């Protein structure tokens, strides 16, 4: 096929067309020696573009393009075309065929009908290709809700191929190692839930539900189910870290659609866990059995998606320093199911910067910054914002999160959010609402939006304020979130100091 050499051309595409480039690139920069490893070449090379490779080598993209083009011309006598825009990160014909298979599933074909065609197309498929395929479908207009609906279906089609892939190998304490440890713990939990539900079904007999209709034998097993469901709720930090630490870094590499689809599936799991707890609280045996099956199946399937697609793709795409930044921000969210996390990087591997959201140390000296009413040092500003009885987030005029305070947090935040598009910082179900607020603020139609919700028995007040400079130009959004439960309960007056 004719190669179009652009910043978006992938290394894998180049090596497929010009195998002699392998030795050339390996000698071009030490970072490219990884390509001599066949596994890395099949994985990293599929998604790594010339632009990304130039960044890894620390050379201008134009320089690397020119050098590659010159070497191709030297070897073949023909310089590759650079006039057009590359079509994407994969072999276009292969990608179109993969997308066609998914469209057939969408149109009603069964996995069994398309599986032979899929197997005839390729011997194996890399996780990066599945992510790129989903991204391409979304870019072409297929709603994310449809990709979400198809996720389990195409996972079944790709299952055998993915399971044949190499096992992941990371150091203890690496973010992926921690995710995997949590997954092992939650799989044990879902297995215990299923076993308890089987015993509960026997104890309940043919009862239709409701406490009065259930025999006494149900009570003991119901208590076990309740304890297991409570433990299952403790898996939440796993999803929060994935959505707020891992996803922002993938988005920086152009992987956005698949992360939004997976976040929507995470929200479905959250809803299923909530439904399970509700069914147990109602002493509804049939509903409890159904909720166990639904929650356990969804969680197990998500583990499979993470282990077979998300994690291998992330290891292919992200750089070492990015993993260190992800690890540096994990502590703000915490870990799931009491999983113990060893230190990483080791003492022999200094961690470098503490993350994309790292600011000055609290005691760092600094000059005074002139403000509208006064002047404060960076240290004083940091102390002030961290002590406020509410949390504040600043989103700039480009919709990118630039700051969040460390006050009384209601919703999770971690350093990975810095630089992330605000639309990607909320669950997919609320993304339209966020975009509506930003659009109204930017157009000058509104200046304030506020909401109040009950979360975990606490009354939470959420407000968004449009920020405009002296000329009236839109400069971003300030979001404040505050637990006002105690404030709402105040009565009368307190005029004297009473500690």
Image (cartoon, rainbow, N blue to C red):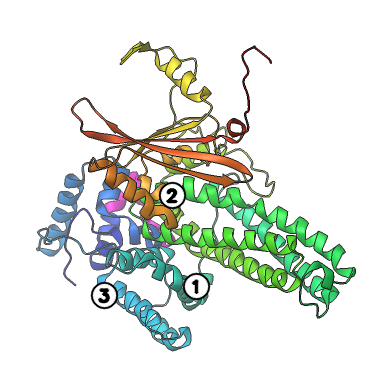
Instruction: Write down the residue under mark 2.
Output: 426
* Quadrant hosting residue 93: bottom left
Cα–Cα gap, marks 3 and 1: 24 Å
Which residue extends farthest front? 492
Q: Residue at x 81, y 60 (%)?
A: 224
- Mark 1 or mark 2: name the one nearer the start of the chain: 1
Q: Secondary structure at mark 3?
A: helix
* In-front residue for pair 82/34: 82
Q: Nearer the viewer, residue 57 or 139?
A: 139
Closer mark to the observer between disc 3 and disc 2:
2
For the question of whether residue 29 can be seen, the reply is no
The mark closer to the camera, 3 or 1, is: 1
Q: Is residue 469 magenta?
A: no
| Location of residue 129 with respect to 423 vertically, above or below | below
Q: Earlier in the sequence, mark 3 or mark 2?
A: 3
Q: Which residue is mark 1?
A: 152
Neighbor class of circle 3 (other Cα within 10 Å; few <14, some 14-19, many 20+) is few
- Residue 408 at x, y = what percent? 55, 31
- In depth, the one of 337 and 63 nearer the eye is 337
Relative side of 462 to 196, left or right: left
The span from disc 1 to disc 2 (Cα, nearest Å) is 23 Å
Q: Comparing marks 1 and 2, which lies closer to the viewer?
A: 2
**Residue identifier under label 3:** 93
Mark 1: few/some/many CA within 10 Å (<14, 14-19, 20+): some
Say which element carries label 1.
Answer: helix
Q: Secondary structure at mark 2?
A: loop
Query: Which residue does the image show at 48% across and 63% down from the upper left?
Result: 309
Q: Position of residue 352 (x, y in %)?
A: 46, 31
Q: Is residue 15 above or below residue 478?
A: below
> Do callouts 3 and 2 mark residues in contact (Cβ within 8 Å)?
no
Q: On the rendered image, what quadrant is the N terminus found in?
A: bottom left
Magenta range is 25-40
């Amino acid at each position: 096929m004719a190669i179009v050499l652009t910043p978006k051309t992938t290394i894998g595409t180049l090596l497929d067309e010009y195998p002699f480039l392998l030795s050339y690139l390996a000698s071009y920069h030490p970072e490219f020696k990884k390509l001599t490893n066949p596994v890395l070449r099949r994985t990293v090379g599929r998604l790594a573009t010339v632009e990304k490779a130039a960044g890894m080598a620390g050379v201008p993209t134009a320089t690397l393009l020119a050098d590659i083009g010159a070497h191709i011309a030297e070897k073949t006598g023909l310089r590759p075309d650079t006039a057009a825009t590359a079509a994407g990160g994969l072999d276009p014909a292969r990608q179109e065929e993969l997308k066609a298979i998914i469209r057939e599933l969408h149109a009603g074909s069964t996995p069994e009908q398309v599986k032979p065609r899929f197997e005839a197309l390729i011997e194996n498929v890399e996780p990066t290709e599945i992510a790129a395929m989903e991204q391409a479908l979304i870019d072409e207009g297929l709603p994310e809700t449809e990709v979400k609906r198809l996720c389990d279906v195409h996972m079944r089609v790709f299952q055998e191929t993915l399971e044949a892939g190499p096992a992941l190998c990371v150091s203890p304490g690496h973010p992926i190692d921690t995710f995997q440890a949590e997954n092992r713990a939650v799989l044990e939990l879902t297995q215990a839930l299923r076993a308890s539900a089987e015993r509960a079904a026997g104890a309940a007999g043919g009862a239709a539900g409701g406490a009065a209709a259930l025999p006494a034998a149900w009570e003991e097993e119901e208590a076990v189910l309740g304890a297991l469901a409570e433990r299952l709720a403790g898996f939440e930090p796993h999803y929060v870290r994935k959505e707020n630490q891992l996803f922002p870094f993938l988005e920086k590499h152009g992987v956005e659609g698949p992360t939004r689809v997976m976040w929507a599936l995470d929200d479905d799991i959250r809803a299923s866990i909530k439904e399970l707890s509700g069914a147990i609280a109602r002493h509804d045996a049939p509903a409890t059995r159904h909720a166990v099956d639904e929650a356990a199946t969804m969680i197990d399937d998500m583990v499979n998606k993470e282990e077979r697609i998300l994690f291998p793709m992330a290891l292919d795409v992200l750089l070492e320093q990015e993993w260190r930044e992800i690890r540096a921000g994990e502590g703000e969210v915490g870990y799931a199911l009491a999983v113990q996390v060893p230190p990483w990087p080791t003492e022999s591997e200094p961690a470098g910067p503490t993350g994309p959201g790292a600011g000055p140390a609290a005691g760092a000296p600094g000059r005074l910054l002139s403000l509208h009413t006064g002047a404060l040092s960076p240290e004083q500003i940091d102390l002030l914002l961290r002590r406020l009885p509410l949390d504040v987030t600043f989103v700039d005029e480009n919709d990118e999160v630039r700051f969040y305070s460390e006050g009384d947090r209601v919703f999770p935040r971690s350093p990975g959010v810095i630089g992330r598009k605000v639309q990607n910082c909320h669950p997919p179900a609320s993304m339209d609402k966020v975009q509506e607020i930003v659009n109204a603020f930017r157009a000058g139609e509104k200046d304030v939006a506020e909401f109040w919700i009950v979360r975990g028995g606490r009354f939470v007040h959420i407000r968004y304020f449009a920020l405009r400079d002296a000329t009236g130009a839109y400069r971003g959004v300030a979001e404040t979130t505050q637990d006002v439960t105690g404030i709402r309960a105040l009565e009368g007056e307190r005029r004297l100091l009473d500690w």
